[in-house]
Amino acid sequence: SFFRQTALPLAVLSALTLALGNSAYVYLSVATCQILKALTPAMTLAVLYLLRVEQPSMMVVMCVLSICLGTFMASRGELALSGIGFGLQLGANLAEACRVVLSQRLLSQLQLPLVEMQYHVAPWQGGPLLGP
């Protein structure tokens, strides 16, 4: 059904992005979280490629690799980098990347306008966040 194949996965991924991303702020500084969020385009590109949604050009890959290199260099200087916080933030980035790829696939395959897709998905996004 539409709900099981589209709304539910998008809702769970959105909730994971929010929950993991907000939890990371307990363990990392705001600056570090923002630096690590710069890895989201790289993760999105990897998920796009792995799921065969889109074949990135060499120029796009080089640009994203330069973002990753800058992120690595900026986060190396962080003295209080918690492994738990780092894992939570990377989990949030991965959930966001998967959500973006799934949204793109839905928008192109089902030809739903963005607002209509949000109409179907938004009410279910809050549900997973209300849990423990």
Image (spheres, grey):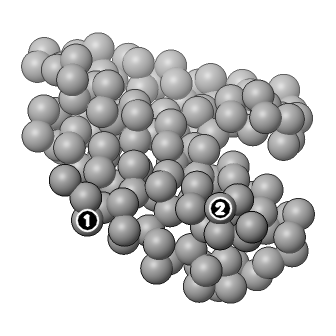
Tag 1, which secondary structure?
loop
Viewer-nearest of discs 2 and 1: 2
Q: Which residue is mark 2?
A: 4
Give the class, few, some or many, for how many residues have Cα within 10 Å of label 1's Cα (few <14, many ≥20).
few
Q: Which mark is residue 130?
A: 1
Q: Quadrant of residue 115?
A: bottom right
Name the amino acid type tagged 1.
Answer: Leu
Q: Position of residue 108 (x, y in %)?
A: 86, 64
What is the CA distance from the residue labelled 2 to the residue labelled 1? Answer: 19 Å
Name the amino acid type tagged 2.
Answer: Arg
- Identity of the residue furthest to the front in this view: 1
Q: Quadrant of residue 55?
A: top right
At a point 18% along the width and 20% down the height, the residue shown is 81
Camera-side residue: 111 or 8? 8
Q: Is residue 110 left or right of residue 39?
A: right
At a point 65% along the width and 62% down the height, the residue shown is 4
Q: In the figure, 116 relative to 129: above or below?
A: below
